[in-house]
Image (cartoon, rainbow, N blue to C red):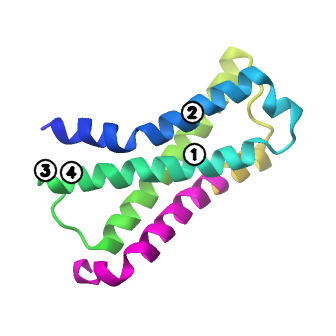
Amino acid sequence: MTGWLLRALLSGGWAPAGVFLGHLAAMRLGAYARYEGFDRPVHVAGGAAIAWFFLRACAEARRAGILGNPATAVETLLIFALTTTAAVVWEFAEYVSDRWMGTRLQGGLPDTLTDLALGMAGGAALLALRSAASWPRDRRRR
């Protein structure tokens, strides 16, 4: 039962892990403080990386017979919803870190909403690329 999850982590988990490690390195190097707006492409990359992970997780769950064979549009909507949820959880984590660990990751409501929108945009962009790349041969799954 958990073999599919391990395969998903190995085939797709590297992407969000890489963005997170890059985020930690950028924090250590002071990139966020030095370059205004540095976090914007990081949130876009994070959204795309999370969507990639969920895309791979869905493929492995489908292969294992857990997910069935949903229509491409349904699977895409599921991946987008999970990516959006991950972006919200990330922003909650930033809030908790600011509140109880003394960091200064959030710059107020406009910053938080921009971060959420950018994470969602990154996920949507990856899903749009996937759709464009697989459109001719994927029509049979709809």
Do the CB atoms of the residues marked 2 and 1 lie less than 8 Å apart?
Answer: yes
First in sequence: mark 2 or mark 3? Answer: 2
Do the CB atoms of the residues marked 3 and 4 lie less than 8 Å apart?
Answer: yes
Mark 2 → mark 3, Cα distance in angstroms: 28 Å
Identify the residue at image location x=50%, y=70%: 128
Q: Residue 37 location in percent, x, y? A: 82, 45
Identify the residue at image location x=38%, y=50%: 54
Q: Give the range drawn in magenta.
A: 118-142
In-image side of 125 versus 106 (left or right): left
Identify the residue at image location x=67%, y=25%: 25
First in sequence: mark 4 or mark 2? Answer: 2
Q: Residue 44 location in percent, x, y? A: 63, 52
The residue labelled by disc 2 is 20
First in sequence: mark 3 or mark 1? Answer: 1
In-image side of 69 versus 119 (left or right): left
Q: Is residue 57 magenta?
A: no
Q: Residue 34 location in percent, x, y? A: 88, 32
Q: Which mark is residue 46?
A: 1
First in sequence: mark 2 or mark 1? Answer: 2
The residue labelled by disc 3 is 64
The part of the image, by quadrant, that contains residue 120 is bottom right
- Placement of the N terminus among the 4 image quadrants: top left
In this view, 35 is above or below 26? below
Mark 4 → mark 1, Cα distance in angstroms: 22 Å
Mark 2 → mark 1, Cα distance in angstroms: 8 Å
Q: Is residue 128 magenta?
A: yes
